[in-house]
Image (cartoon, rainbow, N blue to C red):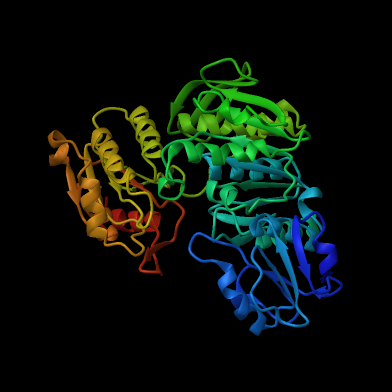
Amino acid sequence: MRTLSDILYNVNIQAVHGSTDITVNALSIDSRAIGSGDAFIAIRGVHADGHLFIDKALQQGATAIICEELPKQLTANVCYIQVANSAIAAGTIAGNFYDNPSQKIQLVGVTGTNGKTTIATLLFRLFGALGYHCGLLSTVQNQIGDKIIPATHTTPDAIHLNALLADMVAEGCLYVFMEVSSHAIHQQRIAGLMFAGGIFSNITHDHLDYHKTFDEYIKVKKAFFDGLPNTAFALTNLDDKRGNVMLQNTRAKKTTYSLRTVADFKGKILENNLTGLIMMVNEKEVHFRLIGEFNAYNLLAVYGAALMLGEEKDKVLQALSGLTGAEGRFDYIMSAEQKIIGIVDYAHTPDALLNVLATIKNLRKGNEQVITVVGCGGDRDTAKRPVMAEVAAERSDKVILTSDNPRSEDPAEIIRQMEAGVPVHLKKRVLSIADRKEAIKTACSLANPEDIILVAGKGHEKYQDINGVKHPFDDKQVLREMLELMEK
């Protein structure tokens, strides 16, 4: 519990109606979660305006209302705080309420289109291997040491985020590594946090349903680096043509990594096969268990961040060489009889799918078929649907277009939009099967010995989101079951 006056420290207040000398039991941006003596923060969201639920929060027992626009009628014995921006205020208030946990740890944020989960997870595992107690905030899961907390968003809202960070501080975490999504930056979910460093992986076509234009998407990612303090480091991928853009206005110490040009942290791939990567990292040869050029970039980002956090080069490389990647990121199995390789990957953008298929191409030993099962999510960026199908058709021997997370959309219509991107001369290699389980089963039945099956788009997810209901579904489990069922 905190007094309202205490948790308003550093908030841009426009007006106050009522006494701030009251105790606040809890904070919420959801009126349904409000209890007696709580503070309700009314945020104008993408799908709903919290100002419309102020009355509901009052009925639930709220004694403090933080909002951008005051209600026409003010309730007695309730303190109303008018602020310039409720979303920014929520971050500051939550920080104050939970005693500013981000200032008591080394918090590192990872942003970019692809690679966020792997980089954050590898950093978490690396620093654990180096003997530190750490926290992880990722798409796959949140973690405090060995304790796993299921994740619902790439980045939680400001209140839940600060609560999680406070738990991590209470449990002795010294470092926390978190994914920072473009939505979280734009919606101010990370407002008020003190970062020790920021990492940029890459930027490609994604989330244009939300950001509308690619330029706006870039600006949002850049805003994270613009907000870093001069005590932090900013580490960017120089091989991405927007890599330098991220550093233009940052006050943080600027550092770079690259496979193709001179950089602070320079890598060169010597070998890339199913046993892993052999790389030169700043003139030192290292074997890694991860596969593919995209993971070479992820490893360089992790290596660079670890050194910026003060760790010793040799210890970092030794620990990194033994680590495996995040679940659902180039996650593969091999069938018992016919040695068919099944790969599950979260690739849900054209660039990510291209990277995975390029890696598979490099791993092929001869005439193996590549059979790709892929879909696109509903209620998301529609422009990438035909592009995803085109990439799959051009880089695979057979393609099965299927349902991903259709959400409120008709899976058949999503597939039709994907089919529009398949070049005429490649249509013969493409099938459409809306049922995802049947699609994976068909891929397995089409596979010959030593062929490669890629199931893309969902990765670590253990569900399919259909009309608001999450039905249990695990790509890797279904793939394994089908291969075993067919005795392949």
Query: Hey, which residue is sitting farthest front in the picture?
Result: 72
132 or 11: nearer the viewer: 11
Whether residue 436 is situated above or below residue 32 in the rendered picture: above
Whether residue 438 is situated above or below residue 372 in the rendered picture: below
- Whether residue 447 can be seen here: no
Point out residue 253 in the picture as x, y percentages from the top left corner: 72, 28
Point out residue 211 in the picture as x, y percentages from the top left corner: 46, 46
Residue at the (60%, 25%) spot, across then down:
257
Q: How many marks?
A: 0
Displayed quadrant of residue 208: top left
Point out residue 114 in the picture as x, y percentages from the top left corner: 48, 40
Answer left or right for 190 relative to 22.
Answer: left
Whether residue 411 is situated above or below residue 80 in the rendered picture: above
Residue at the (27%, 27%) spot, across then down:
366
Answer left or right for 7 relative to 378.
Answer: right
Point out residue 80 in the picture as x, y percentages from the top left corner: 73, 71
Residue at the (64%, 73%) spot, across then down:
71
52 or 462: nearer the viewer: 52
Which quadrant of the rendered structure holds the N terminus?
Answer: bottom right
Displayed quadrant of residue 95: bottom right
265 or 245: nearer the viewer: 245
- Whether residue 137 can be seen here: yes
